[in-house]
Image: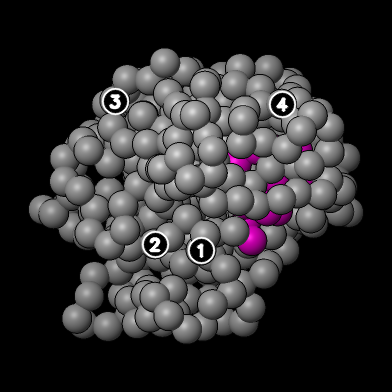
Amino acid sequence: MAELKGKPALATTTTVFYQGKLPFTSKQVETSNGDGSSSPPPKPLLIVTPTTTGQYPVILFLHGFYLRNYFYSQLLEHISSHGYIVVAPQLYLYIPSSGLEEIESAAKVTDWLSSGLQPQLPENVEANLQKLALAGHSRGGKAAFALALGYAKTSLKFSVLLSIDPVAGCTKCCRTQPHILTYVPRSFNLSIPVTVIGTGLGPEQKNCLSPPCAPEGLNHDEFFNECKPPCAHFVAKDYGHMDMLNDDPSGIVGELSGCICVNGKGPRDPMRRSVGGIAVAFLKAYLEDESGDFVAILADPSLAPAKLEPVEFIEE
């Protein structure tokens, strides 16, 4: 693991907040054999991958409630351009399944990676499943925690966990299953590095008809509070729960972000680049022993395009 101790000289910029140098491609993979695959995935997938010859770590990314995997394409392309293969399953369409089915579906996709992912990649691009990251947003961020905690068994091991504005329910009396929050500090039984990215506007209520999209006591603050070190906590002060999604003022995304969630003012690009850059810096630090960018951001959060609150970082 990369050495993160010490305070480096403050950087004036860091390239992780900009699109990387690697060309990439995106493809949708269905659950049928229509594409000729002998091993179709258990759920429809969006795969974003570099096209330059090489071996790359893999990220399993879980979408949020009522959302589509392609709503995150700009964020996932940012990450992939820095040298990562992103696999984003569509776990459900509109109404999520109850109980453990969502997490079990994510586990089945994880198990599929060993035999099914490589044939879906460009020629001369190799997936390195020894460096497997687990990530998710909103309900998917909570599902990522649940999967990492072993609520569904997988044949592969995750090396790191990234959770973007995770949410465990709309109220403490109406939490999503399984109930993984214990409200005991450092209680998560995880032995991998974790980064939690939250939003400052997520806990705010848009109107009297709906609860906040990321209510207090069920959001990023409590998830980080229960993480064991090494763990980091970033909060984009002036952005909301949906502000890392694609620019899409119409359709389902626009309805959700405009009518239910409080959004930040101005374009989403600074928030997407901040989330993408933090993700890349975290992955480089703990998957590739290249800690420079991550340490720089920890020391100087103002490097991010979006304004960040003071960063919390607990090291082993």
Q: Is residue 75 magenta?
A: yes
Local packing at callout 4 (Cα closer than 10 Å; few below 14, some 14-19, many 20+) is many
**Rendered-image quadrant of the C terminus:** top right
The structure residue drawn at horizontal position 40% and vertical position 43%, both measured from the top left corner, is: 31
Horizontal side, residue 231 vs residue 15: left or right: left
Picture residue at 27% right of the left edge, 41% below the top:
102
Q: Which residue is mark 4?
A: 126
Q: Earlier in the sequence, mark 3 or mark 2?
A: 2
The residue tagged 3 is 152
Are the residues at dot 4 and dot 3 in contact (C-beta closer than 8 Å)?
no
* Lower position in the chain sequence, tag 1 or tag 3: 1
Residue 64 is one of the magenta-drawn residues: no
What is the secondary structure assignment of the residue under circle 3?
A: loop
Label 1 to label 2, Cα distance in Å? Answer: 7 Å
Give the amino acid at mark 1. Phe
- Lower position in the chain sequence, tag 4 or tag 2: 2
Which mark is nearer the camera, 4 or 2?
4
* Mark closer to the chain start, 4 or 3: 4
Q: For the point 22% across and 75% down, which residue is it?
A: 210
Report the amino acid beneath label 3. Ala
Alpha-carbon distance for marks 4 and 3?
27 Å
In the rendered image of this protein, does residue 64 appear above or below residue 151?
below
Q: What is the x, y in percent for residue 150?
A: 32, 22
How far apart are labels 1 and 3 at the CA level?
Answer: 26 Å
Write the start and end of the magenta stretch as one range.
Answer: 74-86
Q: Given contact means CB atoms under 8 Å apart, are the residues at marks 1 and 2 in contact?
A: yes
- Residue 71, disc: 1
Give the labeled residue for mark 2. 67
Residue type at mark 4 is: Glu
Closest to the observer, 49 or 168? 49
